[in-house]
Every structure is written in C-alpha cells, then in structure tokens.
Amino acid sequence: MDRLAILCALLGGGISTVVMMHFWLPRPVPILRYITVLLAGIVAGIVAGYLMHVSDSNPMPGIFASLGAGLITSGAVTLFGGGTGHTAMS
C-alpha cells in the first residue's frame, strides 16, 4: 500500500497542479495559492486511492480515482481559496 499511496499522491497533486498552472500561465502565481492547490491535490489523491484500494484489490481504479479527486479538489480550492482573490479563469 505504501507504493500505491505515493503514486496516488504524485498523481493527485502533480496532475492537478499542472492543469491549474495551465490556466495561470499569463501571470505569476501567488505562492499561497500554489501550495494550497498542491496540498489539496495530494491529500485528495491519497484519500481517493486508499478508499478505492480498500473496496477493490485492483489498483487501477484507485489510480484514476486519485486523478479525478485531485483535480476536483484542487479546482475547488483554487476557486474558493486564498491568494489574490482572482479565480483561475479571470
């Protein structure tokens, strides 16, 4: 389970940060917003991967669940979280 948790943390945090950085390319990103998005993606990825691993022995659904949960959670943190007060799309 340790390797799966690390993989889910990297996928949940890494993919969500890459997607959010794509929206932030025109201007610099506040460090507080970057850290909160990264941590939200990591935590959501671990939780989703663990819950899927508990319910099924196949690791593949957990990997996809960590991707989706990381993206959804980091998107919510981006829209409602700290930083400059602007949303990712504005």
Image (cartoon, grey):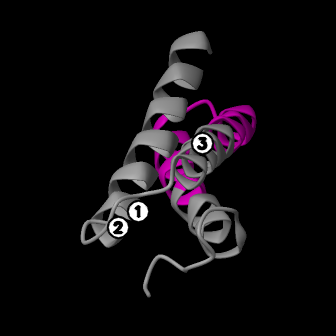
Q: Which residue is mark 3?
A: 45
Q: Quadrant of the N terminus?
A: top right
Residue type pointed to by label 2: Trp
**Residue at horizontal 57%, vertical 43%?**
35
**Residue at horizontal 60%, vertical 49%?**
32
Judged by its main secondary structure, the magenta piece is helix
Mark 2 or mark 3: which comes first in sequence? Answer: 2
Q: Nearer the viewer, residue 71 or 51?
A: 71
Residue type pointed to by label 1: Met
CA–CA distance between discs 2 and 3?
Answer: 22 Å
- Residue 89 picture location, percent across and down: 43, 84
Q: Quadrant location of residue 20? A: bottom left
Could you tell me if the residues under marks 1 and 2 are in contact, i.e. CB atoms within 8 Å?
yes
Give the label on residue 80, or none: none
Residue at the far left: name it. Answer: 26
Helix, strand or loop for disc 3: helix
Above or below, 26 relative to 1: below
Q: Which residue is mark 1?
A: 20
Q: Quadrant location of residue 77? A: bottom right
Above or below, 50 relative to 86: above
**Residue at horizontal 55%, vertical 79%?**
86
Above or below, 4 relative to 3: below
Give the label on residue 24, or none: 2
Residue type pointed to by label 3: Gly
Above or below, 77 relative to 41: below
Q: Comparing marks 1 and 2, which lies closer to the viewer?
A: 2
Image: magenta residue range: 46-70
